[in-house]
């Protein structure tokens, strides 16, 4: 199956979609980019946000890596490296990354949003690429109240000491890179407060 024919549409009540990619941004409306270090709870904030707001659609990224044991089959659109590179060459991604010389990840250019706002949960490097293609994109950086709290959350979710060290270092790098982009910041101390803050940012920027 070619990248341009790949599509999986879930039931209307679902908030996570896989899109037929398009070679144009004409149909793309508001884009919200959510970034932040690992372990700060940004995924939980985003999931809660799209659950309570029908106007938001959470993009499903493409990846060339294999599904991990126990991973939901709809966590990503799992594709072959050939399909991925063909789509990349055709300019069909809003952003893409190649991690550790192995797996590729990307956010396809969607169509069929029908007025919905597209939400991307990606890193700062991906956000930079999105901003180049969609200058009016809304960038939000979610962080823990302190690095110590980030570390506690990583330990609490079962990360190994090596994983914690690696993600803490990556978090420091993400924070530094984020200073170069027009991010708005949300501190995730209490989940409901973080969701409300993110909702307020989107409402203000789209009013």
Image (spheres, rainbow, N blue to C red):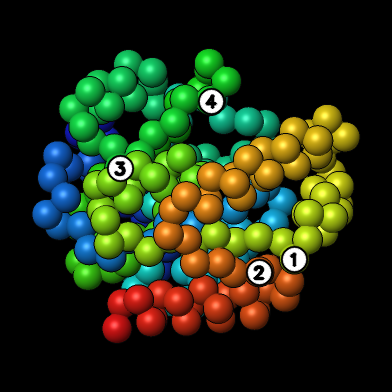
Q: Residue at x 65, y 60 (%)?
A: 143
Distance from Cα at disc 4 to Cα at disc 1: 27 Å
Q: Earlier in the sequence, mark 2 or mark 1?
A: 1
Q: Earlier in the sequence, mark 1 or mark 3?
A: 3
Badge 2 element: strand
Front residue of 140 and 87:
140
Q: Tell me where residue 179 appears, x and y as whole percent.
A: 53, 53
- The answer to whether residue 126 is left or right of residue 150 is left
Graded by Cα atoms within 10 Å as few (under 14), some (14 to 19) or many (20 or more), the crowding at tag 2 reads many
Q: Tell me where residue 65 appears, x and y as whole percent.
A: 52, 24
Quadrant housing residue 77: top left
| Nearer to us: label 4 or label 2 | 2
Front residue of 179 and 101:
179
Q: Earlier in the sequence, mark 4 or mark 1?
A: 4
Q: Residue at x 35, y 76 (%)?
A: 205
Quadrant housing residue 94: top left
Q: Earlier in the sequence, mark 3 or mark 4?
A: 3
- The answer to whether residue 164 is left or right of residue 180 is right
Distance from Cα at disc 1 to Cα at disc 3: 30 Å
Distance from Cα at disc 4 to Cα at disc 2: 27 Å
Badge 3 element: strand
Graded by Cα atoms within 10 Å as few (under 14), some (14 to 19) or many (20 or more), the crowding at tag 3 reads many
| Nearer to us: label 1 or label 3 | 1
Image disc number at residue 145 = 1
Image disc number at residue 94 = 3
Q: Name the residue that disc number 4 marks.
A: 99
Distance from Cα at disc 3 to Cα at disc 4: 17 Å
Q: Name the residue that disc number 2 marks.
A: 187
């Amino acid at each position: 199956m070619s990248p341009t024919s790949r599509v999986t549409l879930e039931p209307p009540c679902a908030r996570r979609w896989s899109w037929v990619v398009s070679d144009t941004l004409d149909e793309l409306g508001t884009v919200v980019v959510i970034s932040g270090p690992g372990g700060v709870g940004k995924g939980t904030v985003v999931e809660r946000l799209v659950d309570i707001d029908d106007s938001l659609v959470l993009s499903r990224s493409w990846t060339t890596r294999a599904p991990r044991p126990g991973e939901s089959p709809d966590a990503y659109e799992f594709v072959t490296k050939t399909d991925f590179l063909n789509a990349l060459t055709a300019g069909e991604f809003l952003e893409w990354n190649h991690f550790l010389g192995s797996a590729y990840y990307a956010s396809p250019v969607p169509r069929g949003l029908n007025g919905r706002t597209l939400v991307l949960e990606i890193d700062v490097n991906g956000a930079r690429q999105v901003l180049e293609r969609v200058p009016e994109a809304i960038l939000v950086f979610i962080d823990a109240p302190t690095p110590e709290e980030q570390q506690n959350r990583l330990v609490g979710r079962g990360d190994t000491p090596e994983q914690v060290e690696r993600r803490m270092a990556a978090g420091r790098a993400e924070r530094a890179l984020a200073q170069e982009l027009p991010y708005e910041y949300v501190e995730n101390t209490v989940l409901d407060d973080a969701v409300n803050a993110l909702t307020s940012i989107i409402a203000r920027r789209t009013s």
